[in-house]
Image (spheres, coloured by chain):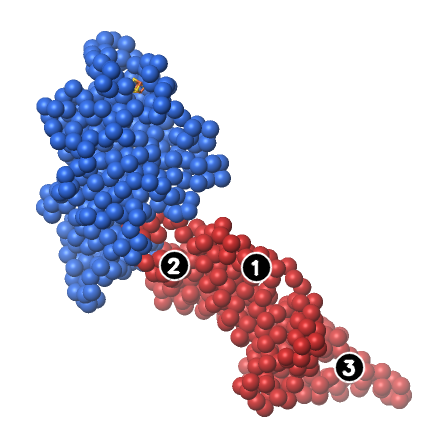
Amino acid sequence: MTDPPAAPRDSLLHVEDLRTRFHTDAGTVTAVDGISFDLDDGETVCLVGESGSGKTVAAESLTRLIDDPPGEIVSGTVRFDGRDLATASEAELRAVRGDRIAHVFQNPQRALNPVYSVGWQLLEAIQLHDDVSKADARARAIDLLDRVGIPDPATRIDDYPHELSGGMQQRVAIAMALAGEPDLLVADEPTTALDVTIQSQVLRLLESIQSASGLGLLLVTHDLGVVAEVADRVVVMYDGTVMERGSVHDVFERPSHPYTRALLDAIPGRDVDLTPTAARDVADRDPSSATDSTTGCRFRSRCPHAVDACREGDQPPLHPTPDATTSAPDGARAHVAACVHFGPDGDPDVVVDSAKSADSGASADESAGGDRR
Amino acid sequence: MGLKWYTARRVAWAGVAAFVILTVTFVLLDYAPDPELARIQFRAAATGADAETAAEAYAERRGLTGPLWERYLEYLGNLATGDWGWSDTRSQPVLTAILTALPYSLMYTVPAVALSTVLGIAIGLYSAFNQYTTTDYAATFVAFFGVSIPNFWFGIVLLLLFAVQLGWVPVLFDAELARTRPLSLANARQLVLPVFVLGTSAIASTMRYARAEALEYVRAAFVKAARAKGASEWRILTRHVLRPTLVPLSTILVGDLLGIILSASYLVEVVFGIPGLGRLSLEAIRRQDTALVLGTTLVPVLVAVLGNLLQDLAYALLDPRIDYGDR
Ligand code: SF4
C-alpha cells in the first residue's frame, strides 16, 4: 500500500493495513482487506459501505471482537494510545474494551442480555473497570440513564430489556457504552434497527454526547444521510477495501471514486440507502468470487469508467485527488481515491467530468440504484 | 399477574395431578386380581368350606367392604396417615418396605444426579465455547457413548473389570454395611460403580442439551456486547451464557433425569445387587404383590409431580420474560 505517510503521533486511533479473514467451510474470505484510516480525539469518522463491504468486521476488528475462530486478524496495526491492539494480549484488550473503547451495536434488543435487568447490565459495565461499591455504581447507573434521556431512570433501572421500546433499549446500550467514560465510541449502525421516528433522536443523542464529552466517534453506517449530518471525515468501503477517504466536505462536494459518485448520484437530494444493491453477506459469498481470488479493481464490473488498466494487479492504491492539496494537505486527512484515473498516469477528469454528461446518471442508476425502479 | 399468583397456580396444579394419580392407583388396586384372596378361596374350597364365606371374611379383615366412594375416602385417608397397604409377599406394611428400600436407592441416585447435572452442564458449556475443537469432539463422543451404551451391560463390564479382575471394589453389594455405616469409605467404594453407570447416561443427555442450548448463545450479540464491555471469558460463560441456557435446560432436565433414573435404577440395582426401590418394585411385579407394586410406583410418580413443580418455579425465577398470564 502506498498510503500517505503515517499519521502524526497525536491521532487517537491509527489503523493501518488491517486485514481480517474468516475461515469458513466454503473457503477463506478476506472480509477486510488492508484498510487504513485515522481518527482524532473528538472527531466523528463515518465508515460507509453496503452490507458485505466489511465495515462491521472492520469496526469489530479494532478491539478484536470478531469471533475467533472462524475470524482472524491476519495483519495490520490498530494503534490506540500508543499500543497495537491487533497484537495486544487478551488482558490488555479487556482493559481497553469498555473502558477506553466502547461499542454500540446495531440491534439493541439482541445486544442486551434478556435475563438480566437494565441495572444489572449497567452495574456490570461500571464495576468491570471501576472498583466502586454497589450503591455508588447504582447511583452512577441512574445518572447514566438520565444522561441518555431515559425518563424516570430510578424506576426504569429495574426494568428488564423486553419491557423497553427499541429506542429506549438503544439508549440503555449507549448508557452502557458510556459507563467507562471511553475515549472512542464505535457505533455500528446504531439507528438501523429502530423506527424511523426514533432514528434521528438516537443520532442526535450520539452527537450531543460526542460534543459534550469530546470522545471520538466511529460511526459505521450505510446511510449517506446520516453521514452528511454527523461526519467530520468519511471512509468509503467496498468489498473489504477503502475506495475513497476524505473530509465530509470533500467527499460530498467533490466525490472522486466512481463508486462514491455512483452512490451520491443515484439519489440526488435524498438519503441514500445502499443496502439492497448488493446485499452480499460475508458468510454466504461464493468463495470463487471471494476477495482472495480477485485481481484488479473490485468495483470493475460495475464501473462505468473501467479501462484495461483496471484489470491489472491488486486494487489500485489510494491516490491523492486533485483537490487533496488544497483541502487537507497532511497525509492521513488527505482526500484520496483508489482508482487508476487518479494515479500518476491517470486523468481524474475522465471520472469527474463525466458527471456532467447524461450517461453517468444512467450508469449510476444501474450500479447503485437499480432496484429502485 | 405476579410471581406469587403463578406459584399458587402451579402448586394447585401439582395438587390436581397428584390427586388424579392417586385416584387411578385406587381404581387399579380395586380391580386388580388379588392372589392372596385366590389362595384363601382355594384353601377354603380344598378343605370343604364355603369359598364365598372365606372371601367375605378376608374382605372384612382387609376393610374391603362398603361402597366404592367410602373405600376411596378411606384409601385416601390411609395414604395420608401412612397406611399404604399390606405387602403379602413380604408380610410387612408397604410403607415400611418402601422406607427400608429407599435409602439404598438414594445412596447412588443422589450423587449420580448431582454429579451428572453439574458436570453435564459444565462440559456442555465448555464444548459450546470450544465448538469444533478436539475437546468438543471428545466430549461429543463421550456423550454419544453414554447415551447409546446399555446400562446393564456397561455395569456388568465394569463389575468384571474392576471388581472381579482388579479387585478394586467389592463384587457384592453389602446392604448391612450400607445401612450401618452409610458414610464410610467402604460404602463409598461399593457405590462408585453404580453411581458411575447411572451418571454416564444422565451426564450424556444433560451435556448434549446444555451444549445445544449454549450454542445458541455463545455467538449471541449480547455475548459480543459483554465482551465489548471488557468482561472476561469466564464471566461471559458463567453469567451471560449459563443463565439463559439454564432457562430451557430447566424444562428438560427434571423429566429427563427422572426418566433415566427410574428406568435405569431397575437394571442398576439388579446388576449390582442393591436392595433399593427398583428391586423392590421388580420383585413385587414378579410375585404379583399388587399393593406393593402400586406403592413403589407411587413414589417416583409423586417425585415427578414435585420435580415438575420445582422446574416450573425455577423457570419463572430464571427468565424474567415469562408471561405469568399464559401459564
Ligand atoms: S480503477 Fe477502474 S474500475 Fe476501478 S473505479 Fe477506477 S476506473 Fe473504475
Residue A254 percent coordinates (x, y): 17, 21
Residue B37's label in the rendered image is: 3
* Residue B226 visible to an observer of this rendering: no
Mark 1 vs mark 3: give the one in front: 1
* Chain for colour blue: A
Q: Is residue A247 above or below residue B125?
A: above
Q: Is residue B43 left or right of residue B164?
A: right
Assign a secondary structure to mark 3.
helix
Q: Check disc 1 and report the residue beneath it.
A: B143
Residue B37 percent coordinates (x, y): 77, 81
Q: Which is more toward the observer, B316 or B167?
A: B167
Looking at the rendered image, the quarter that the C terminus of chain A falls into is: top left
Cα distance in 3D space between marks 1 and 3: 50 Å
Q: Which is more toward the observer, B2 or A348?
A: A348
Q: Which is more toward the observer, B301 or A260?
A: A260
* Residue A79 visible to an observer of this rendering: yes
N-terminal of the two: label 2 or label 3?
3
At x 19% / y 33%, what residue is drawn?
A: A5
Q: Is residue B244 above or below residue A285?
A: below
At x 64% / y 59%, what residue is drawn?
A: B148
